[in-house]
Amino acid sequence: MKVTLAAFLLFTFSFLSMNKAHAQADAPVSAKLNHIAVYVSDLAKSKSFYHSLLNLPIIDEPFKDGKHVWFTLGAAGQLHLIQGEFEKQKFNKNEHLCFSVNSIDQFIAKLDKQKIEYSNWPGTAKEPTLRVDGVKQIYFQDPDGHWLEINDDY
């Protein structure tokens, strides 16, 4: 039986495609982060805080209702700020958003300039924590009290 190169390539491609589709169907479903939503009391104030302090790029948001602001976090996903009725509450530092910067000293200078209080993990004001792996980190709160960590694990 004579097989042409075109027929051989078509058979090979079909076989490989079926195997790939079968392998994908058998693969476990994995998830990746799409977005983080943070509920805020004053959208304009929080938008300014996150945009100016963290230099997060604002992206288009589909609702266009004046109650949402979306930022891109690059490959990590998005941060959505959602305005609503907000009863002041005390948040636990263990629940925080963490961002890495290439210079924690420059970031600390920015916090100092804007008079934003920060501390290390135990709560000592104006002191970074030095983790056992050499990463420096600080903690502070957004206008609604949500905790943020900044570290230099860039």
Image (cartoon, grey):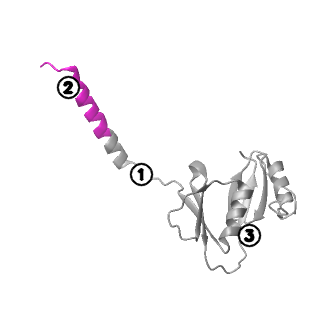
12 vs 97, left or right, is left
Q: Quickly name the residue at label 3.
A: 143
Relative vertical location of residue 82 with respect to residue 24 in this rendering, above or below: below
Q: Is residue 11 magenta?
A: yes
Locate residue 14: give its quadrant: top left
Q: Amino acid at mark 2?
A: Ala
The answer for how far apart the CA atoms under marks 2 and 3 are is 66 Å
Residue to which mark 1 is pinned:
28
Outermost top residue: 2
Residue 29 screen position, x and y as percent: 43, 53
Give the distance between the C-alpha atoms of the residues marked 1 and 2, in whole angstroms.
34 Å
Above or below residue 128? Residue 67 is: below
Residue 35 at what x, y percent from top left? 55, 59
Looking at the image, how many numbered discs can be counted on the residues? 3
Q: Amino acid at mark 3?
A: Pro
Q: Earlier in the sequence, mark 1 or mark 2?
A: 2
**How far is mark 1 from mark 3, CA to CA?**
40 Å
Looking at the rendering, the stretch of residues picked out in magenta corresponds to 1-19
**Element marked by disc 3:** loop
**Which circle's residue, 1 or 3, is located before the other in the chain?**
1
- The residue positioned 23% from the left and 30% from the top of the image is 11
* Mark in front: 2 vs 3: 3
Q: Is residue 104 magenta?
A: no
- Residue 36 is left or right of residue 89, and the answer is left
Q: Which mark is residue 7?
A: 2
Q: Are marks 1 and 2 in contact (CB under 8 Å)?
A: no
Amino acid carrying mark 1 in the image = Pro
